[in-house]
Structures are given as C-alpha cells and as structure tokens.
C-alpha cells in the first residue's frame, strides 16, 4: 500500500481550480487543487466541502462573510451554502467531498480550463 | 461559521493517542491526535482510517509492511486491515473516519490514559 506526499501531488497539478483525487476513504474523495483569481458563486446541494490550506492564502466567500484561510487552517462549507473561493496569489489546498466539484457548475471559471491566469493577474 | 487552526488544535491535546474531533463533513469526523511509543495491534471492520501527518514521524505498521510517514504525507488503512502505529518521538496527525477509534479496542495502550509516556521512553 502506498503513502501519498501531499506537496508532490500539489506540484503535479497543471491546471488552476481543477481537482486531482489523491485518496479515497469511506466514500470520500481527498483531492488537491491550486487556485488563483476567483471562481464563480455556486452551491453543492449534495455534499459538504472541506478545505485544508497547504500553500498561500485562500478566501472562502459566503454571502454572509469572508473566511480567510492561512496555511494549516481548515474550513467546512456545509451543503446548500452558496460560496466561491478567491486568491490573490497562488494557493494550494486539499478538498474533501463525495465527488469532483471543479466543473462549470462547481464555479470553475472559463479562463482556467486553458491553465491561464485570469486577465487581471497577468 | 468558524475556521479551524490545525496546529492550535494539536497544541490543545492533553493525552497521547486520544482523538479530538475538530470538524465533521459528510458523516466523516476529522480528528487530531498526538502519539509517542506504540499502540496495540487492532482492526476496524467498520471504516477506513486516513492519516495525515503534521508533526514528527509516525510508523503505521501493517502485518505485511511498515509505512513511514513524514510531515505532509497521507496514508489510508483500509477497513479490515490489522495495524498499529508507533513513534519514537512525539508525532501529531489528523485522522479521518466515521467515529472515534482511540479506545481500547482501537489499540489505545493502558499507559496513555493518564497521559504518561511509555516506560521505556521516560
């Protein structure tokens, strides 16, 4: 059985705001992703989404408040709560949930599919 | 809604090999624990157990091999696989599973209930 190095998995990411599954346990997917700029507002009705920050700084915006995550901090977006994420500099994190949420309905912005930085950060 | 600082939660632990729940998502408990010395061989038939190391070094022993975990590494003990954990110096980690497993049946050694170090590490 293999152990997994989280930083190596983050280093292997080649696209912003795309999730890579690194482990599965009890029906949960443990995924890594990196982000810069911001994604679109969205809601997951089927799952809570848990973040653990590994690099940089990530703002998880809810309609009621902003949660500023620093390295080593954890936050759960409960199912049904509208949110988006943004980061001024590159951030990297673990996301735990029951499936891959980095698609258009999951807030993934159009520019990120080509692994570009958003226009205003070029 | 509150974010959680993992290192602060680890610092708050007052007993070896006891799990403290810091978050819940999709029916999974995210727990922190610290360990030194070794626990007893045991098996969880009801759940996979996922470890992420935050401090020190932890050996997850299976009957077939030893997995040496360093900071930032992740490992899943599948349900039904006999295992124990050991650490020569204090280690701290996240454990994810569906309930608290740090009881006698979960391998917690008698000496740890009083927050003592094992005799051979005193």
Image (cartoon, coloured by chain):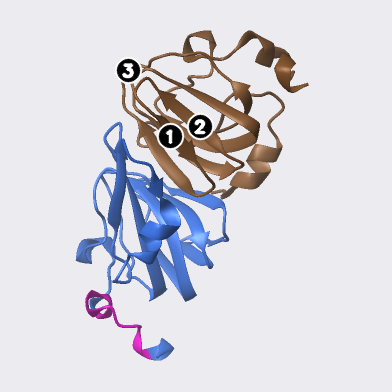
Chain colours: A brown, B blue
| Contact check, label 1 and label 2, Cβ < 8 Å | yes
The stretch in magenta equals: B111-119
| Label 3 vs 2, first from the N-terminus | 3
- Residue A46: which disc? 3
Q: Residue at x 34, y 27 (%)?
A: A48
Is A22 placed above or below B60 here?
above
Q: State the CA–CA distance, disc 3 to disc 2.
A: 22 Å
For residue B42, which quarter of the picture? bottom left
Q: Secondary structure at mark 1?
A: strand
Give coordinates of residue B80: x percent, y percent. 33, 48
- Residue A67: which disc? 1
Give coordinates of residue A76: x percent, y percent. 36, 34
Q: State the CA–CA distance, disc 1 to disc 3.
A: 22 Å
Q: Which residue is mark 2?
A: A59
Density class for disc 2 (Cα within 10 Å; few <14, some 14-19, many ≥20) is some
Check the residue under mark 2 and report the chain it is in: A
Is A5 placed above or below B64 here?
above
Q: Are marks 3 and 2 on the same chain?
A: yes
Residue B72 is left or right of residue A29, and the answer is: right
Residue placed most toward the observer, A69 or A97? A69
Q: State the CA–CA distance, disc 1 to disc 2.
A: 6 Å
């Amino acid at each position: 059985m293999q152990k997994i190095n989280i930083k190596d998995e983050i280093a292997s990411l080649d696209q912003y705001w795309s999730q890579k599954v690194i482990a599965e346990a009890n029906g949960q997917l443990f995924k890594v992703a990196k982000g810069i700029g911001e994604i679109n507002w969205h809601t997951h009705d089927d799952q809570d989404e848990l973040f653990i920050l590994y690099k940089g700084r990530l703002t998880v915006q809810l309609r009621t408040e902003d949660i500023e995550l620093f390295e080593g901090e954890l936050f759960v977006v409960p199912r049904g709560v509208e949110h988006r994420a943004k980061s001024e500099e590159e951030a990297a994190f673990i996301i735990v949930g029951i499936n891959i949420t980095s698609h258009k309905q999951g807030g993934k912005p159009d520019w990120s599919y080509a692994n570009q930085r958003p226009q205003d950060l070029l």
